[in-house]
Amino acid sequence: MNSRLLLQSLAIATLVLMLSACAAGGDVRKPIPTEEFLAAKQPAHRLVVMLPGRGDDLDSLKRKNVAAIIQESWPDADVILTGLTMPFYREGRASNRLHDEIVAPAQANGKREIWLIGISLGGMGGLLYEHEYPGRVAGLLLLSPYLGDDGIHSQIREAGGLQAWQPGPTQTLNSDTFQYELWRTLKVLTGNPKRARDVWLAYGADEPFRKPIEMVSSSLPSGQVLMLPGEHDWSLWIPAITRLLDQVTP
């Protein structure tokens, strides 16, 4: 898999299409920055791993009290906030490093129920993780996920929607194929009723990514999709986190 070419292309696309705020930095020579917040009720029954959006990092997640927001709804969950920022995606190994440095060690330490929450860029990161490691986490909570550019969206609409669209044989990920493989992952997830019940989605009524997100939302159970007032920012994502977690069946 040519992950480096994939994510170099992704970085360019994201710089053009995503929010105008500067991307958060990070030193890829070091481990992904993380901080763990233990559950109020021990032993914890599950683990939530938080993947930030393009403009956020570990410190900003901490300032926004994201762990406390999650544990208000899920007091039986440990939370790991991450600094999986744009430089790790540019490096071309974001999914592999997320697995090797965070998910696999947690599983080795006995965590059997791991959820990924991803915002914007992090939502796409959660889907790319599912592409590389299908079924390794219990579920995905996607908030305003970035889902590629207009070209692939037009192809899917012209085919009659996500379930009618045929992406062809699975391809090695590279700069030409990564969007097909991202949407293939969404097609597989939403087309499998057992797996679809573990995918939860929230977005804003004035969301810049609303149209592509709704190509996915229409293929999920309606109770797992939230459209809330708001745009592509924390005034939307904070209540969305709470409402999604409250709706997930324990």
Image: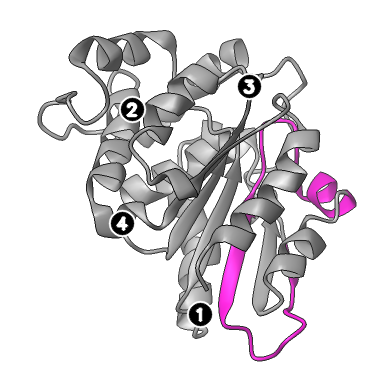
- Which comes before the other along the chain, label 1 or label 4? 1
| Residue closest to the far front | 222
**As drawn, is 129 to the left or to the right of 83?**
left
Residue picked out by circle 3: 207
Q: Which residue in the protein does label 2 denote?
A: 178
Q: What amino acid type is highlighted by mark number 1?
A: Lys
Nearer the observer, disc 1 or disc 2?
A: 1
Q: Nearer the viewer, residue 96 or 45?
A: 45
Q: Position of residue 164 (x, y in %)?
A: 17, 25
Residue 102: assigned label: none
Which amino acid lies under the numbered mark 4 shown in the image of this protein? Answer: Arg
Disc 3 versus disc 4: distance between alpha carbons?
26 Å
Left or right side of 96 for 1: left
Residue that numbered label 1 is attached to: 111
Callout in the foreground (3, 1):
3
Mark 4, secondary structure of its residue: helix
Q: Image quadrant of residue 218?
A: top left
Residue 127 placement (x, y as % from top left): 42, 43
Q: Amino acid at mark 2?
A: Phe
* Three-letter amino acid code at the position of disc 3: Glu
Q: What residue is drawn where x is 62% and y is 33%?
A: 86
Q: Which residue is mark 4?
A: 195
For marks 3 and 1, give the CA distance.
34 Å
* Residue 137 belongs to magenta span: no
Q: Report the span colored magenta.
A: 35-63
Few, some or many residues within 10 Å of mark 1 (<14, 14–19, 20+): some
| Residue 46 lies within the magenta run | yes
Q: Is residue 178 above or below residue 119?
A: above
